[in-house]
Amino acid sequence: MTILIKGGTVVNATGTVVADVLVDGEKIVALLTPGTEPLGAIAADKVIDATGKYVIPGGIDAHTHMQLPFGGTQASDTFETGTTAAAWGGTTSIIDFAVQKTGERVQDGLAHWHELAAGNCAIDYGFHQIIGGVDDDSLKAMDGLIDEGITSYKLFMAYPGVFYSDDAQILRAMQKARELGLMTMMHAENGPAIDVLAAQLAEAGKTGPYFHGIARAWQMEEEATHRAIMLSDLTGAPLYIVHMSAKQAVEQVAWARDKGKNVFGETCPQYLYLSLEKQLGARSEEWGDFEGAKWVCSTPLRSEEEGHLEAMWQGLRTNDLQMVSTDHCPFCMKDQKELGKDDFRAIPNGIGSIEHRVDLLYQGVVDGRISLSRWVELIATTPARMFGLYGRKGVIQPGADADIVVYDPNGHTSIGLGEGRTHHMNMDHSAWEGFEIDGHVDVTISRGTVLVEDGQFKGTKGHGQFLKRDLTQYLV
Ligand code: DUC
Ligand code: ZN
Ligand code: ZN
């Protein structure tokens, strides 16, 4: 099957060019000057007119949690529903987190994650490995990860009793990661201190969702970020801080990078657009004060007045932050978020955004916050380079997988579940209700197969393949 995508503006992280893109089978085989009709082009099996549109590499969401067991329930998107929603929104690869629960063997946790995902994904998928219990056995198991195509792992400085690692465990894991070349991903919040603050608030009767944001104070993120940076410096292990939301924590990453340390930062759409005041403090007729539960996630939404949101945009512009992933971890209000109706500590943490990341970041282009090429760099190219997929993914060039999105800058996307709106994530609400985007994902192609076109989903749940990843390109 050959596809010719004609007349569009191809946007890569390195710049833009008006070109026709020729796809043969699963690969991009040529970028052609428009109007030239070399061998094969005339007879393409399918022609897509991209005149006036952008042709970009498919989005790579490097931080998702399909079916994550968490807070007495599990994330509501399966690999099928979550990857289908991703395709609708122009994302063609995810990297999900395989979970080793405390007390479980790493190999067993990983095997279980393969069982959940295999044959169920609409787009390609890879795994990072969560190490939920650093001990002699799990450290030994890290030796086998690279052969499995898993070149990054995640530790938690938060959630004592669940995924938490103390400093001694972090040090040991980083020493191992340095030896092997694995990227260390860190949830950087001081969990034990947060739990004390949260208990004090609850005892004082401050049990609503808003207090989730108060308990998880920015000092807790700044402190943990600094501690992780110093442990990474000591061990020489490269460090990637996930889901950053506090401006002071980003300052720590900027400081480390200015000192030449091998440290990277990721933020998420919710920390660019949503705030402690507006969302965590929200009220509705249906849910009263509990409305804010829709936006309970960790790290938490932060104060717009204190400048945290602006600092995230600035970090993306200055490259103190290098990537935007979603931390997609959806929970319904009914039966899930509701678990914390009387106590914010029992609200499952997470927001669903996998369908909207490409659009929400494009709005940053429209609003003059980032350039077109930076958009592509943040949503596709750097994720590919950071996590060992570059060349195959993250770029429109001959030899790359034909993971391509045709994006219409004159189109429009109304997000949510209200009148005339829909989404494809398995959620009974949208954290993005009412958001309007000045652009639209017209066509999504994964390895030469059209998944979304003409407002229809044409993919299949078994199409997605497991991505064995190379080492990060940022290792020195
Ligand atoms: N944060 C979330 O919001 N959800 C899942 C885990 C996490 O760290
Ligand atoms: Zn986390
Ligand atoms: Zn996460």
Image: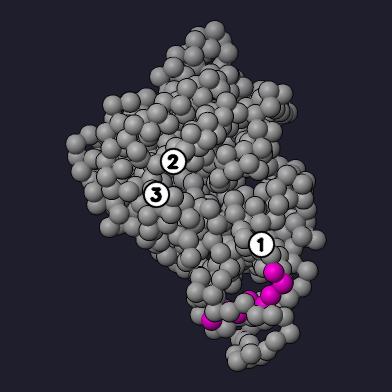
Element on which disc 3 rests: loop
Tell me the residue at 34%/38% (across/down): 236
* Residue density around tag 1, few if under 14, some if 14–19, many if 20 or more, within 10 Å: few
Report the span colored magenta.
17-24
Query: In which quarter of the view is residue 239 placed?
Result: top left
- Camera sees residue 421: no
Is 94 situated above or below 434? below
Q: Which residue is mark 3?
A: 475
The residue under label 1 is 15
Q: Nearer the viewer, residue 59 or 163?
A: 59
Residue type indicated by callout 1: Gly
421, 165: nearer the viewer: 165
Q: Which one is earlier in the sequence, the residue at label 3 or at label 2?
A: 2
Q: Which residue is mark 2?
A: 262
Ligand 2 has an atom within 8 Å of the beta carbon of the residue at disc 2: no
Q: Considering only vertical position in the picture, is 105 above or below 38?
A: above
When asked about the image quadrant of residue 254, the answer is top right
- Magenta span dominant secondary structure: strand
> For the residues marked 1 and 3, what is the alpha-carbon distance in whole angstroms?
25 Å
Q: Is residue 164 left or right of residue 379?
A: left
Q: Position of residue 49 (x, y in %)?
A: 73, 76
Q: Residues within 10 Å of mark 3 (few under 14, many from 20)?
A: some
Q: Nearer the viewer, residue 156 or 110?
A: 156
- Marks 3 and 2, how far apart in space? 8 Å
How far across and down, in percent of the image, does residue 138 sit?
24, 40
Relative image position of residue 67 (x, y in whole percent): 44, 46
**Amino acid type, label 2:** Asn
Question: Can the viewer see residue 319 in this picture?
Answer: yes
Color encoding of the figure: one colour
